[in-house]
Image: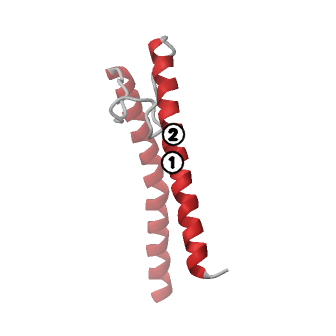
Amino acid sequence: MDVTRLKRELQSALKELKRQRSDLDAQISGVESALHSLGGGRARSKTGGGGGSGTRKKPHWSPEARKAAADRMKKYWAGQKKPAAAKKKKKTSTSKAKSE
């Protein structure tokens, strides 16, 4: 089989598959519209999301929840900084002892 013939057959197959995809997209859209009109929920967009503008809603935290999260993070970072500071002090003290 020569390359030109193979290329034509592949292009023909690709054209047919794209036509079938177009038909399927139209059928899917019709079914989604029917479901939506029957109250079966939101129709999904082609991008696979849940419909809408595609932006994610921000979580709405109460002031108490926001403060509690901030306190937890302060405690976490304080704990992370202590070991790093301790390692730094050990390295500087041992390097002075070695140089003497």
Given residues 96 and 26, the one toward you in this image is 26
Instruction: Choose top left, top right, bottom left or bottom right for residue 58.
Output: top left
Tell me the residue that label 2 is attached to: 23
Q: Residue at x 32, y 32 (%)?
A: 53
Q: Residue at x 46, y 25 (%)?
A: 43
Q: Is residue 3 above or below residue 31?
A: below
The amino acid type of the residue labelled 1 equals Arg
The amino acid type of the residue labelled 2 equals Asp
Residue 28 location (% of width, % of height): 52, 31
Q: Residue furthest bottom?
A: 100
Tell whether label 1 touches label 2 (CB within 8 Å).
Answer: yes
Q: Residue at x 49, y 82 (%)?
A: 97
Residue 82 location (% of width, % of height): 46, 54
Tell me the residue that label 1 is attached to: 19
Q: Is residue 3 above or below residue 39?
A: below
Given residues 86 and 43, the one toward you in this image is 43
Residue 88 location (% of width, % of height): 44, 67
Q: Residue at x 51, y 39 (%)?
A: 23
Which colouring convention does the figure follow? secondary structure
78 vs 4, left or right, is left
